[in-house]
Image (cartoon, helix red, strand yellow):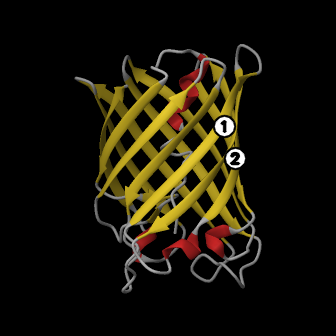
């Protein structure tokens, strides 16, 4: 299993185009369930997460992100630690591009490091009077250390329902290029939908989401997730 860093860690880094954030920041997050595109990485249990990020005024960013994990079945892997770097390009006044690479590592078991793998990504954003639209892509040529190609495509839209209150709807599809090496519940691909409400209060960011997949397994069924985070400028 893995975490999609674009969903959590790099989302705050898109602000590099504006220099609103400090050059270096740290974020701590508590979530009722850590899911990767609808699949729990903690067997449906809560997780503690943290990141350390650098954002340059030229759009370059780099950082590290960590989370507790639990893959069950006697597996002792308990920590995921990811590193990433990329650059945000403002192509014109409405269109942006965020491109970079990430490396996922796992720790806690003697075989945990065999799961490590790289991933490249490209995210296109379009800002309009009715909100922000995203078209995002991720690709790994060694998914979960199995020498299997794997890619994810996503379309999402975020709109403001009231000042300081936003709703984001997304649809993504995860696909394995070699189902003999990696499959999703016996299939080469699956779909995932997510609807989330986002707001902030007294320096804390709140995210309440409902999501589901078309896989009929307990760790990927419909669920509600609550996350609370706080970011500190360093």
Q: Are marks 1 and 2 in contact (CB under 8 Å)?
A: yes
Label 1 residue SS: strand
CA–CA distance in space, label 1 to label 2:
9 Å
* Residue 109, horizontal then vertical, whole percent: 42, 78
Decide: is 67 above or below 89.
Answer: below
Label 2 residue SS: strand
* Residue 7, horizontal then vertical, whole percent: 52, 46
Which quadrant is home to the C terminus?
top left
The residue positioned 34% from the left and 58% from the top of the image is 33
* Residue 115, horizontal then vertical, whole percent: 57, 72
The residue positioned 44% from the left and 38% from the top of the image is 52
Q: Residues within 10 Å of mark 1 (few under 14, many from 20)?
A: many
Question: Considering only order in the chain, which callout, 2 or 1, is on the residue closer to the N terminus?
Answer: 1
Task: Give the image quarter of residue 89.
Answer: top right
> Which of labels 1 and 2 is toward the front?
1
Residue indicated by mark 2:
121
* Residue 31, horizontal then vertical, whole percent: 31, 51
* Residue 155 horizontal side relative to residue 41, left or right: right
Q: Residues within 10 Å of mark 2 (few under 14, many from 20)?
A: many
The one nearer the camera, 194 or 234, is 234
Decide: is 113 above or below 102.
Answer: below
- Image disc number at residue 86: 1
């Amino acid at each position: 299993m893995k975490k999609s860093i674009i969903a959590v860690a790099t989302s705050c880094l898109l602000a590099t185009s504006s220099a609103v954030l400090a050059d270096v920041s740290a974020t701590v997050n508590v979530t009722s369930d850590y899911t990767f595109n609808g699949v729990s990485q903690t067997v449906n249990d809560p997780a503690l997460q943290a990141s350390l990020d650098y954002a340059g005024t030229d759009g370059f960013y780099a950082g590290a992100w960590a989370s507790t994990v639990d893959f069950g079945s006697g597996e002792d892997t308990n920590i995921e630690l990811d590193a990433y770097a990329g650059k945000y390009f403002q192509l014109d006044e409405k269109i942006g591009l965020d491109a970079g690479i990430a490396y996922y590592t796992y720790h806690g078991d003697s075989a945990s490091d065999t799961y490590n793998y790289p991933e490249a990504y490209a995210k296109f954003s379009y800002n309009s009077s009715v909100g922000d639209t995203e078209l995002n892509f991720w690709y790994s040529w060694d998914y979960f250390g199995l020498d299997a190609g794997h890619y994810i495509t996503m379309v999402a839209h975020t709109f403001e329902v009231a000042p300081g209150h936003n709703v984001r709807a997304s649809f993504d599809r995860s696909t394995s290029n070699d189902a003999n090496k990696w499959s999703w519940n016996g299939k080469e691909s699956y779909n995932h939908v997510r609807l989330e409400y986002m707001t902030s209060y007294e320096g804390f960011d709140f995210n309440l989401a409902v999501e589901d997949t078309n896989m009929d397994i307990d760790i990927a069924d419909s669920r509600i997730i609550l996350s609370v985070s706080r970011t500190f400028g360093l």
